[in-house]
Image (cartoon, grey):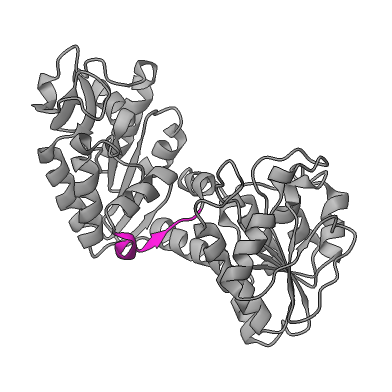
Amino acid sequence: MNVIRFTDLCAAGKVAGQRVFIRADLNVPQDASGRITEDTRIRASVPCIRLALEAGAAVMVTSHLGRPTEGAFKPEDSLAPVAARLGELLGREVPLVSNWVDGVQVAPGQVVLLENCRLNTGEKKNDEALSRKLAALTDIYVNDAFGTAHRAEATTYGIAQYAKVASAGPLLAAEIDAITKALAHPQRPLVAIVAGSKVSTKLTILKSLSEKVDQLVVGGGIANTFMLASGLSIGKSLAEPDLLDQARAVIESMRARGAAVPIPVDVVVAKTFAADAPATIKDAADVADDDLILDIGPKTAELLAAQLREAGTIVWNGPVGVFEFDAFANGTKTLAHAIAESKAFSIAGGGDTLAAIAKYGIEDKIGYISTGGGAFLEILEGKTLPAFEILATRAAG
């Protein structure tokens, strides 16, 4: 995908003295008192901001935080805690500016944080009048917020339509490159792991990937539905019996291409859903009526791990069992370490996936960890994200 890259503008000396508007993703979790509990997104935004400052730009940064009501400010909606943390990371004060739509005072070499952009009336509906006002604030617009790339809002889409220059920040550009490498031009075999509680929430992803991948590994409640579709008993496990036809269609789509959806040969079951429930390993054909399947079995895990070690590209979205409970974590742990050991290019995304990566300490062994949950899923569905689309359109001239 051809987009204007902010790094290229900086390298070409086109940023000095310019007003740069950066749409970052600073939507971080906070506790009841407003303290930030996890600052990964803020830390991820720092390289782009530093790049702009070092290039001599007058820098404005904004983000959404939470789900505020447009036009109705409440203290809990404020980016004030983010401004404080950003200042610590940058080693300088970062002033927070409210009511900024009609003008911002910022000089070259300075940075300001613009208050929660979703407080602006018309932001979520991508209002044209608001978008034009935002574009008038800046010489160079930079989208560095992949987590919102699937939404066409005033600060993610409209401003890019009307700004003099619209570019991709380093974080967004890295996402574009990783996704292109994994899905548009993959090294084969291409293996995708798609897991979760429901087929219905990921059916379009499964259908889209079934046309591209060589192995489609399903896990969690999704695997239970596929087991049921393959004629196996799953006891009282979570599944969606009304989607068996769709599951069979995915299996047939893969088979027609000489690819496969591996069905578990063994599973780990319990009688209740609890961390201290006794775990029993059973052959997939031996699941009892009162069993709950909470993980893939060790034989299945090793068969899948062997495929992952031989893969050329791996796309990972979702743990394959209830990895939060140690008795039902072996499947996810085995696959996580296989991905880490593989020579394949790997891309992983989704909150539970990131939690599993952190739990098993393999962050530095994954080719690319995506920062966007919903945006990552929509990419896997084969959708073109609005933020990518408008940046590509502007790059084309």
From the top left corner, tell me how far across and down residue 295 is, in percent. Answer: 22, 33
Q: Residue at x 56, y 73 (%)?
A: 47
Left or right: 68 in relation to 102: left
Q: Residue at x 29, y 37 (%)?
A: 218
Which is more toward the observer, 333 or 316? 333
| Image quarter of residue 358 | bottom left
| Image quarter of residue 240 | top left
Looking at this view, name the residue that lies furthest to the front.
Answer: 33
Left or right: 106 in relation to 352: right
Left or right: 124 in relation to 314: right
Residue 276 position (above or below residue 259): above
Q: Residue at x 16, y 30 (%)?
A: 268
Which is more toward the observer, 44 or 136? 44
From the top left corner, tell me how far across and down residue 355 is, in percent. Answer: 37, 48
Looking at this view, name the residue that lies furthest to the top.
Answer: 289
**In this picture, which residue range is highlighted in magenta?**
362-371
Q: How many numbered tags mark residues here?
A: 0
Q: Is residue 377 magenta?
A: no
Q: Is residue 211 visible?
A: no
Which is more toward the observer, 82 or 217? 82
From the top left corner, tell me how far across and down residue 152 is, in percent. Answer: 69, 48
From the top left corner, tell me how far across and down residue 236 is, in percent. Answer: 26, 15
Q: Residue at x 27, y 23 (%)?
A: 273
| Image quarter of residue 157 | bottom right
In which quadrant of the rendered image does the N terminus lie?
bottom right
Residue 319 position (above or below residue 114): above
In which quadrant of the rendered image does the C terminus lie?
bottom right
Q: Is residue 373 visible?
A: yes
